[in-house]
Image: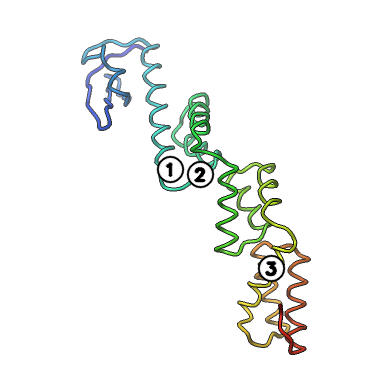
Amino acid sequence: MPDHIVELKPRPRGRVTIKLAGGRFFTVPLDQTRALSVGTALSDGEISRLDRIDQYFRGKSKAMLLLSKRARTRAQIKTALEKLSIEPSIRDGILSELIEMGLVDDRRFAREYVHLKSEVRGFGPHRLRHDLTRLGVGSAIVDEVLDGSFDSEKQTSMARELALRRAGGGSVDEKTARRIADLLRRKGFDFEVVNRVVYDLLHRRKDGGALE
């Protein structure tokens, strides 16, 4: 229903908060308030326009704040905007703008995530697939990035390094071998890779040989 302005309050970054007699308020850019003053009557259409402007800038500010801290997926930004009750059309417009600007890029996010988590945390492809899917990255992108980052040789090399580190240079019995196998499975390596690495570790150490 129509309403009128009871307060115009300047805000940082060139914005103004508009408070209506009915209790609603909107924060919009200064240039959207040139023709407004305390007492100005607003129609339903004008109130709706201010509401949409307010939603856009609230949503854009939230998205930029999140992205300033670390990279985010499209799904993560979408969820954050939904929590602010941003209308779907405005939310999608913000997302499209961020994607066009290169600030949201699920493919780049997945590549950087895989590189970091595999190199620093020793995660294998199954763990990475689970994590990327949970973060909202599409299956086609996940497949593409993992296929380009892992092969059997790399998996085996990573799993072997983790196994040797956990073994600590000492002898490996059946109990220790099972613990190492559990660790490698939690890290997300293929079942065949885990079995091969643990089998080699157990038997070569028993034979007194080194695991290369």
> Is 91 left or right of 139, judged from the image as shown?
left
Q: Amino acid at mark 2?
A: Arg
How is the protein colored in the picture?
rainbow
Residue under label 2: 72
In this orientation, which residue lies closer to the viewer: 1 or 10? 10
Residue occupying image coordinates x 68% and y 43%: 139
Q: Secondary structure at mark 3?
A: helix
Q: Secondary structure at mark 1?
A: helix
Residue under label 3: 157
Q: Position of residue 9 (x, y in %)?
A: 22, 26
Mark before the other along the chain sequence, 3 or 1 = 1
Residue occupying image coordinates x 23% and y 22%: 8
Q: Secondary structure at mark 2?
A: loop
Please determine whether, in this image, residue 26 is positioned above or below residue 173: above
Q: Amino acid at mark 3?
A: Ser
Residue under label 1: 66
Please determine whether, in this image, residue 197 is positioned above or below residue 73: below
How far is disc 3 from disc 2 in space, using C-alphas?
Answer: 30 Å
> Is 184 left or right of 93, judged from the image as shown?
right
Quadrant in the picture for residue 137: top right
Q: Amino acid at mark 1?
A: Leu
Instruction: Answer whether labels 3 and 2 touch (C-beta < 8 Å).
Output: no
